[in-house]
Amino acid sequence: MRNLLLNPVLNKEFKLRFRSFKGFLGLAFYLLALSILIIGFIYLETKNSPMGLFRPDQSRSMFMMLSFIQMGLILFITPGLTAGVISGEREKQTLNILLTTNQSSTSIILGKLISSVSFLLLMIVASMPIYSIVFLFGGISPGQVVTILGYYIFTILAFGSIGIFFSTLIRRTIIAMISTYGVTLFLTAGSAFLYAISMSVSQMGMAANNPVPYFFAMLNPMIILLGFLEPNAFRELSSQSGGGIDFPLSAAYLISYTIIFLIMIMISIRKLRPNMKVKSKG
Amino acid sequence: MIEIIDLTKKYGKFTALDSLNLTIEKGTVFGFVGQNGAGKSTTFSILATLLSPTSGTAYINGHNISKEPKAVRSQIGYMPDFFGVYDQLKTVEYLDFYGASYGISQSERSKLIPQLLELVNLTQKQDSYVDVLSRGMKQRLCLARSLIHDPEVLILDEPASGLDPRARVEMREILKELKNMGKTILISSHILPELAEMCDTIGIIDQGRLVAEGSVNEIQQRLRGEKLIIAKLYRELELAVNFFEDQPLVSQLAKRDDGESLQFMFNGSVEEQIQLLKNALLHDIPIVSFSEIETNLEDVFMEITKGVELS
């Protein structure tokens, strides 16, 4: 952990990323857009309300809407931020020099992952005070907000690891980017689509106790987010799609993406530098 | 000390490096010369642990590149032929980043960086952003970067390529200083005369094979046992032709375009060369000048890489 905090790659990337005015301008615009969205939502709901009030259930709907928007943002931005970090260094011809230093491959990969998603993490954390407006009107507990924040961070790191993986394995950034977006699309839209199809097959009674919908649901970040926001509806969804599996979908999501994260990072670490050992023939 | 044993690198059917054997003594400067694509950068990449060999191995200060790549990395300072720099990073920060990457403490880095900038004449550019530096300055900065952990061995892949004459001279001076500091330097170029001045030994690589190795003089002598001699005459050109044609050590006799001198290859010792001139004067050949032409290093290089293999 100490090595990670004293990671030269991380320090350098932080310096480069947060030095420019553009970064802070981007953050300011994001927070401004979020504020306008919240104020607009409250204004419209209040205006349409017969009593002219903003009720706790409306506050809850607003929080859900914001949460899904943020999650969409995470899934859209994370591949773009991570898929070029290693291949980009390779294209800029700075990677070779970095690889001849004493820095371990683990330190380089983790430094690159954290630094590349750090701006997104900053955006999410910086938006938390705006999120907290919901507390004025009720409907959401602080625990739920913290859970959502933790869930975001986990999802960013998990999907970020996929970007790092392709960036390490594929030499060209554009190909790495396409591959990362492809996998992200499959894990989000693809898994939702397959979940819907497998659910309809199960409901038609063609396959009793079919666990397939459960597996697609546990891979989908949006379905899991729904679970954190609407626990009761989610329980119903889990029991319908479970096919006899009595294990929380959120836990299954955490486990499956932890495994994906570890595999992606371990392969990236192994493949960053060439295996210098000569393969003996015969 | 660098020891390369049967180092081979193949890309499918293409052999980029073919059983390279080489020993470079500690504190010496070895120049690696070859055309583009001859295998110089492949060798350097393997030594810098950036590329795995197909077979064979190498040792740097006793550390095996295949078995102890981490130990090798701490022993070498590597400068690739093409390299990029990070945008928005200042010269001092650039060196500081690499210093930290080698595990050098902050206090040590603060002392080291000004010294390195002074060595490569970049003190005045310490607060400039690296991406706006000139090519020559970037090359010098990269050299300073390769020295930050005080490596015993420097692997410099065409450090002077793309530089203007002044920047080349500056680079050469820095390398001479590093040689005086006792560093073992492995340097490559596709221009032989560029290396001749500063290298103790040179190796010529062609199509992945080391075709010649030794001091510049040794290589010249091994390639050419003969000397090119030009004799300028005062009239009596035909008489001179008849005389030199009869000499056993003379070959490839030809009249030059100026119409008053002859050139020929002479395959003999200095004493025999003196005797030839004496005999010519005794035969009343009116020789105005009799001179040996220095062998051009470029010609040597071209000759060797034409496929002549020296044993």
Image: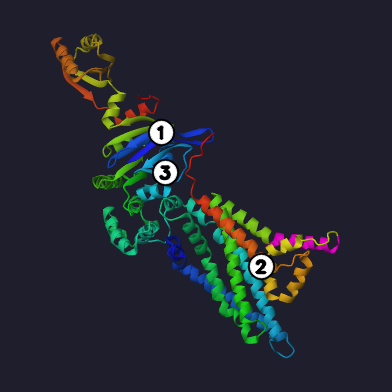
Indicate how the structure is coloured in the image: rainbow
Tell me the mark number nearer the camera, choosing from 1 and 2: 2
Q: Which residue is mark 2?
A: A251
Q: Which residue is at a point 25% across and 48% down the rendered structure image? A: B181
Q: Secondary structure at mark 2?
A: helix
Residue found 59% across the figure and 73% down from its top: A149
The residue tagged 1 is B20
Chain ID of residue with mark 3: B
Amino acid of disc 2: Ala
Answer above or below: position of A254 versus A279. below
Are the residues tagged 3 and 1 within 8 Å (C-beta)?
no
Q: CA distance from mark 1 to mark 2?
A: 56 Å
For residue B112, which quarter of the picture?
bottom left
Q: Quadrant of the C terminus of chain A?
A: top right
- Whole-percent x, y for residue A271 in the image: 52, 50
Which residue in the structure is indicated by mark 3? B65
Can see residue A118?
A: yes
On the rendered structure, is A176 left or right of B172?
right
Label 3, label 1: how far apart the Cα atoms are = 15 Å
Q: In the rendered image, which quarter is residue A152 located in? A: bottom right
The answer for how far apart the CA atoms under marks 3 and 2 are is 45 Å
What is the span of residues highlighted in magenta in the rendered image?
Answer: A188-205
